[in-house]
Image: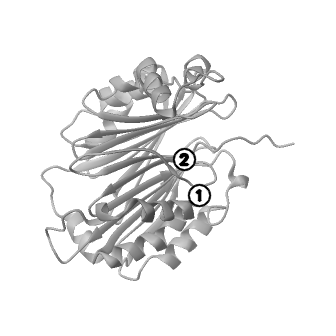
Amino acid sequence: MAVSGFEGFEKRLELNFSGDDPEIGIGFRQLDFQSLEKVLHAVQCTVVSAVGNQYFDSYVLSESSLFVYPTKIIIKTCGTTQLLKSIPPLLHHAATMDLKICACRYTRGNFIFPEEQPYPHTSFEEEIVYLEENLPENLCCRKASVMPSKLSSHSWHVFSACDQSQMAMQKSPCDDQLYTVEVCMTGLDRVLARKFFRLPNDGKTGDSAGKEMSESTGICDINPNALICDFAFDPCGYSMNGIDGDRYSTIHVTPEDGFSYASFECVASIYNDIVEVLNKSVQVFRPTTVTVATTCTSHEVWMQVAKAIEPLGMKFQSCTVDDFPAAQNVVFQVFTGR
């Protein structure tokens, strides 16, 4: 009989918008909490904690994270959530605020329990069809691809679409090029994974237990400048969103043995050193397998990945590179324990 458990691998959706007014102001941040809850209800998740600053709002969800910028939405959900069902209501809300979608990117790894996924996530082909049918025609530059690795159990799925204006911007130089790093870790060290379990009837709230986990595991030291919004689930599991100016980071942990998983994601500038941050984030979990997907125009960024991970006893296995509209270069690297 097949063994099943909680699906740690997230689905990630990023939607970018534009408007006639160059000074759009708060944009999507004006969306009231009840409207956000309705969007998340379609996805099958809820808000458990939240924090914001002058740049964006951050929500820890019952299944991962939501980040709301004036003209950008990032939703990352795990388990059996139906992430892509957030697209129709978000496009509806955008229209009421005179915002027009100009780019979309959807990414995920290989599900541990693919047979448990509901529509429209039963296969990548089905996800592509849903995206094609629900995105407007102005996103005319589209590409979908599965980026393989030497490990059949690990590949990276990417769908990217944008309008002509985003394609033109992609070809022009940027003074402060930002990139996204998505790290997926499986086979967590059992001793370290136990730190993400709560004692029965511990009398703590999810927020207070989450803060203790952030401190005891060293997660709070990954970026000491970040304002951390964390939450510990009962009986186990952990989520964290970090806010540092206009940039976010996020960690999610499924610690159960047999299907343990952790993810780390951050956005940074090509002028920042990613080595220390990556090294610290992987060291918290000591996994048997690490995959890193970087989305950036600069080759220097993904070349730094091995410098961060190999000193932890991990062996480089493979690297796949592809380019996507509105996503620049996507580089998918895999490392395993020696």
Question: In the rendering, at what x and y percent does residue 102 appear?
Answer: 31, 72
Circle 2: element type: loop
Q: Mark 1: which amino acid?
A: Gln
Residues 134 and 148: in front is 134
Residue at (57, 33) in percent of width and height: 237
Residue on which disc 2 sits? 63
Q: How is the image coloured?
A: one colour
Q: How many marks?
A: 2
Nearest to the observer: residue 95 or residue 179: 95
In the rendered image, the residue lying farthest to the front is: 203
Query: In the displayed structure, would residue 182 be above or below residue 308?
Result: below
Residue 235's quadrant in the figure? Answer: top right
Residue drawn at x 57%, y 45% is: 9
Residue 332 left/right relative to 152: left
Q: Is residue 81 left or right of residue 87?
A: right
Chain-order first, disc 2 or disc 1: 1
The reply to whether callout 2 and callout 1 are in contact (CB within 8 Å) is yes
Q: State which quadrant residue 5 falls in.
A: top right
Residue 258 picture location, percent across and down: 70, 31
Amino acid beneath label 2: Glu
Q: Quadrant of the N terminus?
A: top right
**Compared to 92, does 54 lie above or below?**
above
Does residue 29 sit above or below 212 in this rendering? below
Q: Where residue 160 sits: x, y (%)?
A: 41, 65
Badge 2 density bin: few <14, some 14–19, many ≥20, Cα 10 Å:
many
Residue found at x 57% / y 42%: 150
Cα distance, mark 2 to mark 1?
9 Å
Residue matched to label 1: 44
Res. 295 visible in picture: no
Q: Quadrant of the C terminus?
A: top right
Secondary structure state at the residue bearing disc 1:
loop
> Dot 1 surroundings within 10 Å: few (below 14), some, or many (20 or more)?
some
